[in-house]
Image (cartoon, coloured by chain):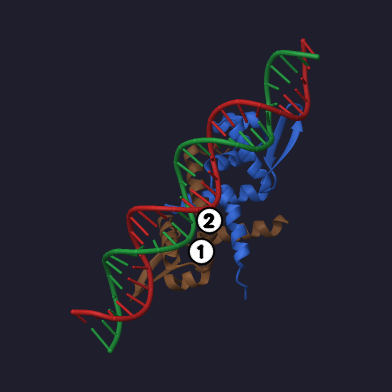
Chain colours: A brown, B blue, C red, D green
Amino acid sequence: MERDCTIEEYLELAELFKVFGDGTRVRILGALKDKEMCVCDIADKVGMNKSAVSHQLKSLKMANMVKSRRDGQNIYYSLSDTHVEEILNIGFEHLREGR
Amino acid sequence: MERDCTIEEYLELAELFKVFGDGTRVRILGALKDKEMCVCDIADKVGMNKSAVSHQLKSLKMANMVKSRRDGQNIYYSLSDTHVEEILNIGFEHLREGR
DNA sequence: TGAACAGTTGAATAACTGTTCAACTATTCA
DNA sequence: TGAATAGTTGAACAGTTATTCAACTGTTCA
């Protein structure tokens, strides 16, 4: 017997998915799937300027999805835990089977 | 050796998660988890008027997440497949383990 | 020290989106 | 037929948000 989820839990869930619900952010997360990258390289890969990427990285960091470390001039970002990749994969699976 | 995902695939993924990234929509999906419901009952449950719920149900239907059947005056909505519930559960799991 | 490179920040803009309202369609039943 | 109930629709409004720009901080290295 499972209890119903509260409104607050659903709102929190929506906040979580909202982070994945943007093309730029999801591409950044995808880029970080196999290796850590600095802001410049991420910007190159997703085809946006450093500023835009930095803004989105901030969102991702506040959502606890990426972590960062400085090495000299560069700041390297990586996925903060395996859940992020897991959620991405479930999403892709859904799209593949969808039609 | 896995190939990189295309930009289009990431954008499609973002569109998928965007649907889950709204409090009202995610509560509607949560309400439909165990049983089909008509628009009025959904509206009662999530505390919104029929119009707002109907608009969101349209989004959910276009995203292939709910299906509907008419029975007399009522139109009953239900989850279109098990993926939807699965994605919700993964999200909740992430929140629970998150902190 | 200062030039060059990496990244961040805040304000401004433009685009998007969720909710409301009023008017509409569809079905039932007396 | 017509009143009542269920649901949909489109326009309008308000709130949110992603991107851009310019100015800033921090680090390296000559």
Q: Check disc 2 and report its element: helix, strand or loop.
A: helix
Q: Mark 2 highlights which residue?
A: A20
Name the foreground residue: A48 vs B41. Answer: A48
Q: Residue B21 location in percent, x, y?
A: 54, 48
- Residue B14 appears in the figure: yes
Q: Is residue B57 left or right of residue C2?
A: right
Q: Residue D23 location in percent, x, y?
A: 29, 64
Mark pair 1, 2: CA separation = 9 Å
Q: Check disc 1 and report its element: helix, strand or loop.
A: helix
Residue under mark 2: which chain is it in?
A
Residue drawn at point x = 58 percent, y = 42 percent: B25
Q: Mark 1 highlights which residue?
A: A29
Name the foreground residue: B34 vs B23. Answer: B23
Residue drawn at point x = 65 percent, y = 32 percent: B39
Q: Earlier in the sequence, mark 1 or mark 2?
A: 2
Name the foreground residue: A93 vs B55. Answer: B55
Is residue B57 depicted above or below A88 in this figure? Answer: above
Q: Residue A85 location in percent, x, y?
A: 54, 62
Three-letter code for the amino acid on which mark 1 is drawn: Leu
Q: Residues within 10 Å of mark 2 (few under 14, many from 20)?
A: many
- Residue A35 appears in the figure: no
Is residue A25 depicted above or below C28 in this figure? Answer: below
Q: Quadrant of the N terminus of chain B?
A: bottom right
Residue drawn at point x = 66 percent, y = 41 percent: B58
Is residue B79 depicted above or below A81 in this figure? Answer: above
CB under 8 Å between discs 1 and 2: yes
Three-letter code for the amino acid on which mark 2 is drawn: Phe
Question: Is the residue at mark 1 from the same chain as the one at mark 2?
Answer: yes
